[in-house]
Amino acid sequence: MTGLKTALIILRNNYREVKMSWEQIVIFVVVLWAIVHTIIDMQVKKKVDDLAMKFEEHKH
């Protein structure tokens, strides 16, 4: 959640300076969430694949 808090603080500061519209803020948050979600999914998939490979090795 620290990254999300940081992103929201940046957005709040940018809103004061740039006057971002709510649509831009929503798009930014959604894109940020998608990037973080994709990175987490890739890490989880790698760990699951490693565990599956270890399981297959010990299955004999």
Image: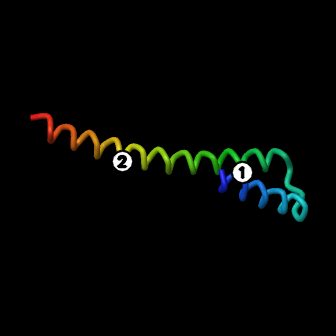
**Residue 37: image location, x then y, percent:** 55, 45
| Front-most of residues 2 and 10 | 2
Looking at this view, name the residue that lies furthest to the top: 59
Q: Mark 2 Cα within 10 Å, few/some/many (few <14, many 20+)?
A: few
State which mark lies toward you, 1 or 2. 2
Hey, what amino acid is under mark 2? Answer: Lys
Q: Tell me the element at label 2.
A: helix
Q: Residue at x 81, y 45 (%)?
A: 23
Q: Residue at x 18, y 38 (%)?
A: 56
Hey, what amino acid is under mark 1? Answer: Phe
**Residue 57: image location, x then y, percent:** 15, 41
Q: Which mark, residue 56?
A: none
Relative to 35, is 47 on the left or the right? left
Relative to 7, is 14 on the left or the right? right
**Residue 26: image location, x then y, percent:** 76, 45
Q: Tell me the element at label 1.
A: helix
In the depicted structure, whether residue 56 falls above or below residue 16: above
Q: Mark 1 Cα within 10 Å, few/some/many (few <14, many 20+)?
A: some
Q: Residue at x 84, y 62 (%)?
A: 13
Quarter of the C terminus within the rendering:
top left
In the depicted structure, whether residue 8 falls above or below residue 57: below
Q: Residue at x 78, y 49 (%)?
A: 25
Return the residue at label 2. Answer: 46
Q: Which mark, residue 28?
A: 1
Looking at this view, name the residue that lies furthest to the left: 60
- Where, by quadrant of the figure, is residue 6 drawn? bottom right
